[in-house]
Image (cartoon, grey):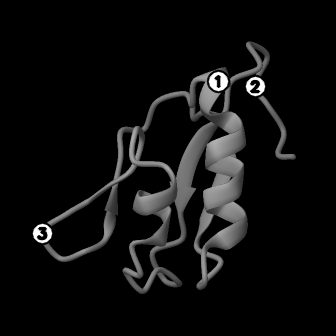
Amino acid sequence: MPDRDEDGALRLAVDWSRCEGHGLCAEIAPDLIHLDGNGFPAFLDTAVPTRLEPVVAQAVAMCPALALRMAAPRR
């Protein structure tokens, strides 16, 4: 599990050099991830709600390009 900030929050992050626009992440976590007009993931740079962390962890684990990750929010 990634490091959390002092509030315990996590956020989603994408390595755009790896992302190939498979769209699997949006299918697994549709409450947080949507696809843009080109089929790439789009989401707000906000904390992942605790109740959705297991779903997001599954999306991260199943990303075929290993482009999706959870990280501590930016300051």
User: Visible in this render: residue 72?
Assistant: no
Say which label, 3 or 1, has the lower sequence index.
3
> Which circle's residue, 2 or 1, is located before the other in the chain?
2
Residue type, label 3: Gly
Out of 20 and 3, give the one closest to the viewer: 20
Q: Kindly identify which numbered label has been placed on residue 51.
A: 1
Give how far across and how far down residue 64 sits, in percent.
60, 83
Mark in the foreground, 3 or 2: 3
The residue under label 3 is 37
First in sequence: mark 3 or mark 2?
2
Left or right, 61 with respect to 46, comes to: right
Q: Is residue 1 left or right of residue 64?
A: right
Q: Tell us which disc is closer to us: 2 or 1.
A: 1
Q: Is residue 32 visible?
A: yes
Secondary structure beneath label 2: loop
Secondary structure, mark 1, is helix
Which mark's residue is nearer the viewer, 3 or 1? 1
Q: Secondary structure at mark 3?
A: loop
Report the amino acid beneath label 1. Answer: Arg
Residue 38 x/y as whole percent? 17, 76
Return the residue at label 2: 5
